[in-house]
Amino acid sequence: MFFDLIKINELISGYQYFVLFPLVVIEGPIVTVIAGFLASLKQLNFLTAFWVIVMGDLLGDALHYFIGRWGKETSIQRWGRYFGITPERVARLEQHFKEHSGKTLLLGKLLHGVGASFLVAAGVARMSFSRFILFNLIGTLPKTLFLMLLGYYFGKATSRIESYFEIAGIIFLLIGMIVFAILYYIAKKKKYD
């Protein structure tokens, strides 16, 4: 992970949307969940954070796309043979993206960890940038909403759990005091008997 979770939380809490945007470009899903959590605590506005995250995610994905598009020839010629990437495989990839670009890109948005390779592959295959952005947006909107809601409801549950721990702590304290009083009474009674 690029940053640890506490540092990300501190950065977003302190600088809010000014740091949220670049953090999403670097580490999108984790930052999105944290933003949802902070929205549940009223430190961020849910809708504002949502749109900042969508824009940051699209920028990060566009960077991956352009890495594939502009680095295609030199990277494949220089490094392709080490990874089994041949001109024939690139031609098949281009054909696949011509026939199934939307489905492939949406699948890539749902798969964490390997999603970036789908974005780079779209650039390598020279998928039209407007089509890339359209399908990317279609995949980004529900994914961002899901991750933000995950963080939001986790934040709500955390505050509820916290209040339950307070109640449980008071109950255990009272039980402990009662047990102590009973034991003290029994010890005193034995001493005088």
Image: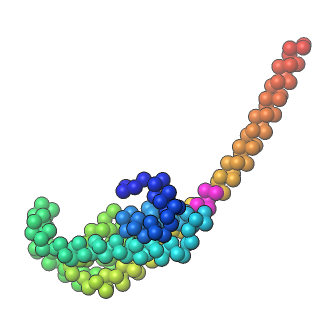
The secondary structure that most of the magenta stretch takes on is helix
Task: Residue 182: give x, y in percent of width and height.
Answer: 83, 28
Reply above or below: 89 against 162.
below
- State whether residue 114 appears in this view: yes
Where does the C terminus fall, quadrant-wise?
top right
Tell whether 29 sits left or right of 88. right
Task: Residue 91: give x, y in percent of width and height.
Answer: 14, 78
Quarter of image, res 155: bottom right
Q: Give the colouring mode of the picture.
A: rainbow
Residue at image x 39%, y 72%? 57
Residue at image x 83%, y 19%? 187
Tell whether 5 sits left or right of 165. left
Q: State the residue in front, 52 or 172.
A: 52
| Residue 183 is a magenta residue | no
Q: Which residues are magenta?
A: 155-159
- State whether residue 146 appears in this view: no
Q: State the residue in front, 43 or 77.
A: 43
Tell whether 182 sits left or right of 126. right
Task: Residue 192: give x, y in percent of width and height.
Answer: 90, 14
Reply above or below: 15 against 121.
above
Reply above or below: 187 against 92.
above
Where does the N terminus fall, quadrant-wise?
bottom left
Task: Residue 157: give x, y in percent of width and height.
Answer: 61, 59
Residue at image x 83%, y 29%? 181
Quarter of image, res 95: bottom left
Residue that sits furthest to the right in the current view: 193
Residue at image x 33%, y 73%? 61
The number of callouts visible is 0
